[in-house]
């Protein structure tokens, strides 16, 4: 069937993102981007770049690990599914503790601190948006109601349309729909 036609491709993707190294015949690294010591991912992987290790979108990492969890579950690989779920939940914890603060969000988290800039710019819509996308059922793991209630959502009115659509679910969490 259709699923079988893509199994090996999805297996390769999952092993690249969440693999243990051994199951893949050592063709892929152990959890390419996830730092088990720090408890979250680095966009560059575990090797620092010229300015050290950094990560812009924690929510994208959560979504990747949730995808691995779902795929491994579908394949019946319970051990790999448990590891992927643990990575997703730990990444989500990092999202709540490192990327979001009362009233806002970081644009980038790096080894030496955080930045309020993103690749898109330094507006609040960019910072909260990059920590929200892709919007999914898992968005609430990082953008909690308690955090959303601390944000003054008035800035959403002036945000570009594409960012407003990304922000809508978290604005609703914080009860800011009237402001936006």
Image: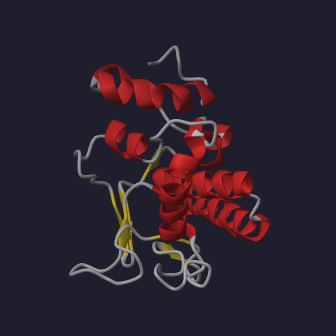
Q: Examine the rendering and report whether any part of residue 100 can be seen.
A: no
As displayed, is residue 28 above or below residue 135?
Answer: below
- The image quarter in which residue 49 lies: bottom left
Q: Examine the rendering and report whether any part of residue 115 can be seen.
A: yes
As displayed, is residue 93 above or below residue 40?
Answer: above
- Residue at x-position 67% and y-position 51%: 70
143 relative position to 109: left or right: right
Please name whichever residue, 78 or 108, is drawn nearer the observer in this view of the structure: 78
- Residue at x-position 54% and y-position 84%: 25
Q: Position of residue 134 (x, y in %)?
A: 46, 40
- Residue at x-position 57% and y-position 73%: 19
- Residue at x-position 78% and y-position 65%: 78
93 relative position to 115: left or right: right
Q: Position of residue 106 (x, y in %)?
A: 40, 55
Please name whichever residue, 80 or 127, is drawn nearer the observer in this view of the structure: 80
| Picture mark count | 0
Please name whichever residue, 131 or 180, is drawn nearer the observer in this view of the structure: 131
As displayed, is residue 132 above or below residue 156?
Answer: below
Q: Position of residue 27 (x, y in %)?
A: 46, 81
Q: Position of residue 24 (x, y in %)?
A: 55, 78
Name the outermost residue toward the front.
Answer: 1
Name the outermost residue toward the top.
Answer: 178
Coloring scheme used: secondary structure
113 relative position to 18: left or right: left
| Quarter that holds the C terminus | top left
| Quarter that holds the N terminus | top right
């Amino acid at each position: 069937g259709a699923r079988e036609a893509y199994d090996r491709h999805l297996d390769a993707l999952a092993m690249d993102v969440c693999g243990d190294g051994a199951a893949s015949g050592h063709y892929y690294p152990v959890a390419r981007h996830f730092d088990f010591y720090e408890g979250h991912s680095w966009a560059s992987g575990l090797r620092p770049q010229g300015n050290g290790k950094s990560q812009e979108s924690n929510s994208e990492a959560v979504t990747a690990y949730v995808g691995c969890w779902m795929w491994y579950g579908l394949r019946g690989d319970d051990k790999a599914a448990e590891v992927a779920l643990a990575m997703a939940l730990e990444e989500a914890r990092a999202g709540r503790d490192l990327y979001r603060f009362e009233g806002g969000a970081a644009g980038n988290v790096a080894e030496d601190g955080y930045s309020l800039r993103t690749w898109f710019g330094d507006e609040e819509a960019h910072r909260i948006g990059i920590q929200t996308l892709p919007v999914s059922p898992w968005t609430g793991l990082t953008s909690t109601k308690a955090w959303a209630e601390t944000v003054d959502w008035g800035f959403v009115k002036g945000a570009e349309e594409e960012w407003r659509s990304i922000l809508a679910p978290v604005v609703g969490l914080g009860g800011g729909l009237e402001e936006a």
